Image (spheres, helix red, strand yellow):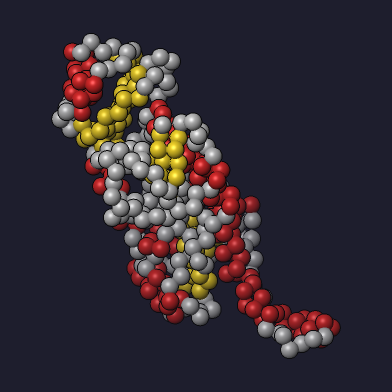
Amino acid sequence: MHKIRTYNQISVKGLERFPRQQYEVGSDIGSPDAFLLRSQKLQGIEVPRTLLAAARAGAGVNNVPVADYSKQGIVVFNTPGANANAVKELVLAGMLLATRNILPALNYVQSLTQISDAAAMAQLLEKEKSRFAGNELRGKTLGIVGLGAIGSMVAEIALGMGMQVVGFDPALSIDAAWRLSNAVMRMENLQALLARSDYISLHIPALDATRHLINEDTLASVKKGAVLLNFARESVVDSAAVLRSLDQGKLGRYVCDFPEPAMLGRADVIALPHIGASTEESEENCAVMAANQLMDYLENGNIVNSVNFPAVSMARRPGTWRITFSNDNVSGVLGNVLSVLASSQVNVIDMVNKSRAELAYNIIDVENKPSDAVIEAIAGTKHVIRVRLINA
């Protein structure tokens, strides 16, 4: 029986993925094999000795102590792309709110409580509507910083709206490149993108390298009157620098999902309460993906969408036992483990080894069940972090 401890309100569709005869799931589970969470901060929470994995139903893992978990061989999963459509749609809404003066127009209409005659209201609105004239998106240039799952979807919808799209992503993966329309023009650097774009949409993770990527220096290159949209992470933007750019008339508007007190009451800022992924469909997609990843890892040792371990997957052969182990990514470890198996006459049927940065992960299928002594010998091998035996 596998045990899953949940944090936050996890979508029922995700929880229903766990077969009841194989899984015990709940918020008060003791000695869990895995954590399943959304926004719960795990920093400072005691790590059970039994913990093998943590899955965050969402893309960011700022609330998970990834480095500490890595040292203990705990695999951390996220769900990239599961909330991409929700964020994409909100980015489009943000561009429309910024360019069509929708909110001022709405607020003006709601203020006309003193008028009781419909004809009089219609006459007044016909006279005043020119105050709220805006611009169209068609023909404008959208610059997208980060062309992953969300960025590529934003590019697609912008192209469908008749916009020109330019993009910048120095870490563009092969998979992301395949998803990207060839109508998107790749820019060589951020400054070139900022200088060309009428709208700039950020879709990059929160890393040390991306902290305050949008700052005083980079904003010096921005096209006058441009609209900056941040539905990525709060830390990628220096908000004080953005407000100064707005005050100086450089940036036209700032649309974000991360309000701060200094942004309130400004007509040139549209700040939403972090609702980018807050749709029923998005929460379901994230929970289902996280549950599927946990089950595949716990039952088969396969790793998909981990932020700290390499992607490793191998099909199960009926009747075989599976050994998985993580280790420091140094030479000789796999050879030493194979020597342990050979000396104990454990026949290897199939195996796969992958590494990522300082960590490596291995799946080895063997013909018969290894003894406890063999598993202990592998665990005692130098640089091995964690060993699991998955039964047939």
Relative to 195, residue 252 above or below: below
| Residue 356, position as x, y percentages in the image | 29, 37
- Residue sitting at x 67%, y 83%: 111
Relative to 101, residue 182 above or below: above
The residue at the far bottom in this view is: 114
Q: Is residue 340 left or right of residue 185?
A: left
Relative to 160, residue 133 above or below: below
Rendered-image quadrant of the C terminus:
top left
| Residue 153, position as x, y percentages in the image | 55, 49
| Residue 184, position as x, y percentages in the image | 53, 49
* Image quarter of residue 376: top left
Q: Is residue 203 left or right of residue 322?
A: right
- Residue sitting at x 35%, y 70%: 216
| Residue 118, position as x, y percentages in the image | 82, 82
Q: Nearer the viewer, residue 20 or 289?
A: 20
Q: Is residue 367 left or right of residue 329?
A: right
- Residue sitting at x 49%, y 63%: 274
Inspect this view and state whether residue 343 appears: yes
Count all numbered tags in the image, as a single digit.
Answer: 0
The residue at the far right in this view is: 119
Q: Is residue 23 left or right of residue 138?
A: left
* Image quarter of residue 89: bottom right
Q: Nearer the viewer, residue 351 or 300?
A: 300
- Residue sitting at x 42%, y 55%: 39
